[in-house]
């Protein structure tokens, strides 16, 4: 399938590129949180801190090959806030052994809409809203039932404006029309 690309703008200021493309299956180690997480930078820093403290001494932080991501297991529009599950993850070799608070899972591959954003910490919700509210209804695609995730492309502390460069990955499949009759 040829890659499809859309160019959009977030609230009149930021240009965003959205591509529909095949993403590979990812083997990840993770620390999971259950409960509210929206806008809680301290929570995510703690989850990733735990994960990095575990991964570093095991030689699993091999940047740029190692990907850093968050997986969202539940839809916040449907699931009660105190039951929302998110996992702070890094990619690891498939045979990596985990223990304690560190889990391991496979993030399914397949077709995803991938939006590349350059965000301030308080703009994540706006970015997700743009993908779901603006792009998806006009795209000819519908959501698939695999989890959504964010791939972090940089360390914001190293960006001249402290921006977060992030790919938001939403699983999609072609929209199916019902057969008349």
Image (cartoon, helix red, strand yellow):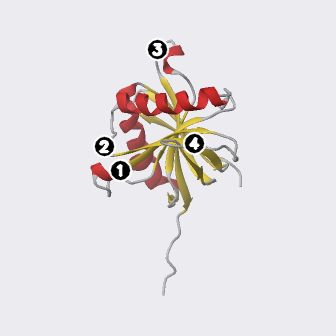
Judge from the rendering whether residue 112 lies leftward or rightward of residue 122; answer left or right.
Answer: right
Image quadrant occupied by the N terminus: bottom right
Q: Earlier in the sequence, mark 2 or mark 3?
A: 2
Q: Residue 138 at what x, y percent from top left?
A: 47, 53
Q: Residue at x 55, y 31 (%)?
A: 54
* Mark linked to residue 161: 3
Judge from the rendering whether residue 41 lies leftward or rightward of residue 152; answer left or right.
Answer: left
Alpha carbon of mark 4 to alpha carbon of mark 3: how far? Answer: 30 Å
The local secondary structure at tag 3 comes to loop
- Name the front one of labels 4 and 2: 4
The local secondary structure at tag 4 comes to strand
Name the residue beneath numbered marker 2.
36
Name the residue beneath numbered marker 4.
29
Alpha carbon of mark 1 to alpha carbon of mark 3: how far? Answer: 31 Å
Q: Residue at x 47, y 21 (%)?
A: 163
Q: Is residue 52 above or below residue 83?
A: above
Name the residue beneath numbered marker 1.
84
Q: Residues within 10 Å of mark 1 (few under 14, many from 20)?
A: some
Q: Earlier in the sequence, mark 4 or mark 3?
A: 4
Q: Residue 84 at what x, y percent from top left?
A: 35, 50
Instruction: Please say if the residues under marks 1 and 3 sit with CB atoms less than 8 Å apart.
Output: no
């Amino acid at each position: 399938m040829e890659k499809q690309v859309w160019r959009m703008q977030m609230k009149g200021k930021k240009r965003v590129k959205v591509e529909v493309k095949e993403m590979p299956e990812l083997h990840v180690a993770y620390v999971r949180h259950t409960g509210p997480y929206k806008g809680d930078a301290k929570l995510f820093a703690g989850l990733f801190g735990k994960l990095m403290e575990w991964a570093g001494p095991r030689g699993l932080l091999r940047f740029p090959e190692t990907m850093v991501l968050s997986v969202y297991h539940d839809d916040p529009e449907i699931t009660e806030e105190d039951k929302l599950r998110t996992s702070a993850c890094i990619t690891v070799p498939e045979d990596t052994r985990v223990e304690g608070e560190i889990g391991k899972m496979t993030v399914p591959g397949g077709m995803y809409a991938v939006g590349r954003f350059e965000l301030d910490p308080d703009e994540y919700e706006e970015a997700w809203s743009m993908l779901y509210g603006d792009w998806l209804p006009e795209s000819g695609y519908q959501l698939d039932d695999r989890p959504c995730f964010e791939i972090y492309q940089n360390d914001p502390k190293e960006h001249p404006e402290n921006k977060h460069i992030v790919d938001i990955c939403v699983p999609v499949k072609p929209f199916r029309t019902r057969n008349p009759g």
